[in-house]
Image (cartoon, grey):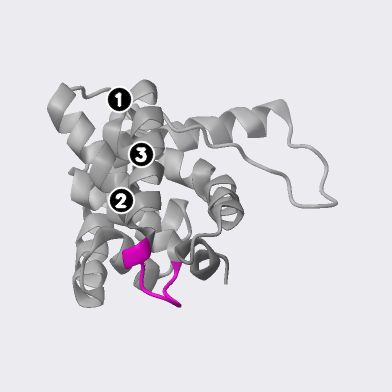
Amino acid sequence: MLADRARDGDVDAYEELVRRYRGLAFRVAWLVARDRSEAEDAVQEAFVKAYHAMAGFRRGAPFRPWILQIVANEARNRARASRRREALRLRVASVAASGDAAPSPEAATLAHDEAQILLRALDELREEDRLVVAYRYLFELSEAETADALGLPAGTVKSRLSRALVKLRTHLVASQGATA
């Protein structure tokens, strides 16, 4: 396991972990900090902190939730310290299924508009709700990985996710009523 090799002092293994999780870590940091510069700094600092904490990493444990928890904490600390709050802007690209023709300009515009509506509704949620939805559905973590990454019991993730989805649905219905 790569994380175990890194824990044992293999620098090349740790560099591979950084390469593997840097993109996901940035998206998590951006979701929390909501500022590109702060997110980049948070990711860099989180990987440095994780490197120094590797001796305490539990052998055989999954690395992804562990690093994402460190990244989220670092981003949260930076966001609080700087008091920056920008609108959530994630790029959601629609990828045509293999073998399908490229979407028409109309379909692409509609998909983009729908993604923007979803992101605005997601932005209306509290940070803890936004994170649980994003980890589970945008970053495709399992419930167990989401619980590990957020440092919460699995039952808390289930209930928080359920409540967050109800709130998200409410925001989406309200936004569709406003555009109708």
N-terminal of the two: label 2 or label 3? Answer: 3
- Label 1 sits on a secondary structure element that is loop
Location of the N terminus by quadrant is bottom right
Q: Nearer the viewer, mark 2 or mark 1?
A: 2
Residue closer to the observer: 177 or 81: 81
Location of the C terminus by quadrant is top left
Which of the 4 quarters of the picture holds residue 67? bottom left
**Amino acid type at mark 2:** Ile
N-terminal of the two: label 2 or label 1? Answer: 2
Can you identify the residue that label 1 sits on?
Answer: 87
| Crowd tier of the residue under label 1, counting other residues whose Cα lies within 10 Å: few below 14, some 14–19, many 20 or above | few
Which of the 4 quarters of the picture holds residue 7? bottom left
Q: CA distance from mark 3 to mark 1?
A: 14 Å
Q: Nearer the viewer, mark 3 or mark 1?
A: 3
Residue closer to the observer: 121 or 137: 137
Can you identify the residue that label 3 sits on?
Answer: 29
Q: CA distance from mark 2 to mark 1?
A: 23 Å
- Label 3 sits on a secondary structure element that is helix
The span shown in magenta is 55-62
Residue closer to the observer: 112 or 87: 87
**Are circles 2 and 3 on residues that touch, CB within 8 Å?**
no
- Which residue occupies 38% across, 42% down? 48
Residue closer to the observer: 13 or 125: 13
Can you identify the residue that label 2 sits on?
Answer: 70
Is residue 177 among the parts visible in the rendering? Answer: no
Residue 70 in picture, x, y percent from top left: 30, 51
